[in-house]
Image (cartoon, grey):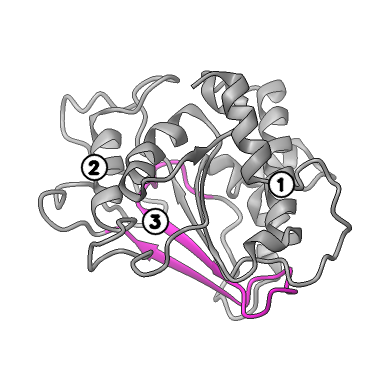
Amino acid sequence: MTARRALALLATLLAGLAGTLPAGNADAAPRRIVIVRHGEKHTPLTLCSIGKERAQALAAQYLSPTSPMSLLRGDPPAAILAMTLHTVETARPIARAWKMKLVAPPIGYVPIRNDRYFNAKLNTVNQRVARDLLENPRWHGKTVLMVWEHFHIASAALEAEFAGEQITLRQLLNLDRVKGVPGGVPKTWPNPNYNFFWILTYDRPEDTVPSRFEVIRQYFAEPFANLPSNNWGAPEPRPPGSGCT
């Protein structure tokens, strides 16, 4: 997909990113936001063998249109969003399963770089997407799937680097204000973890803070039962030759 085509899709499906909607727009928030990290990496360009298998497993089971295991069964996502090459590669099988177009910004099709300039570009994507989700009435009552990069989900280090700005989903979606979460929503998504979902539920469309925050761990059934499912913050066991970095 060309950058021009990707930008056109983003403009079409994420209306309001340019900031034309007033702050505090009523009846706007989705009913549910499902957040999942991309699969395990091989290089800045591609996923490793485990990551590719995880992408297929997500499409076949947890994020399938038909599987009894699916978090989305009977609840088609209004959009499937991605933000980087790794998230695009992870999300493509899911989008194909739903026969939907994948939505990603032009920067999502270039190799990721862990530097301030590139992170600032992704910060802008995060800010625009989060604002649109909370202010655009098109999402009212719907579910949105975000296949995302973990630093921009939650990272205390990234927040410290850009102190004074709201740049992670944890900040932008007000997850630090969610009630009833023992210990609070984690400030950092651990680097070794590719095997969890964060699910945000909004009881009322005018809410800007989720009513509920749920963490779901991935335990795949056959033929994907071999995929790692390490504890939160624990090292991920990987077989020799996986090519994962």
What is the distance, in whole Å, between disc 1 and disc 2 at their CAs?
41 Å
Q: Which residue is mark 1?
A: 15
Does the magenta segment cover residue 215?
A: yes
- Disc 3 and disc 2 in contact, CB within 8 angstroms: no
Identify the disc placed on residue 237.
Answer: 2
What is the distance, in whole Å, between disc 1 and disc 3 at their CAs?
29 Å
Which secondary structure lies at badge 3? strand
Other residues around mark 3 within 10 Å, as few (<14) / some (14–19) / many (≥20): some
| Marks 3 and 2, the one that precedes in the sequence | 3
Q: Which residue is mark 3?
A: 196
Q: Amino acid at mark 2?
A: Pro
Q: Is residue 153 above or below residue 144?
A: above
Outermost residue to the left: 223
Q: Amino acid at mark 1?
A: Ala
Q: Is residue 181 above or below residue 100?
A: below
Residue drawn at (62%, 21%), measured in percent from left and top?
A: 4
Residue drawn at (60%, 69%), measured in percent from left and top?
A: 184
Which secondary structure lies at badge 1? loop
Q: As rendered, which of 145 and 213 lies closer to the eye?
A: 145
Q: Amino acid at mark 3?
A: Phe
Does the magenta segment cover residue 217?
A: yes
| Marks 1 and 2, the one that precedes in the sequence | 1
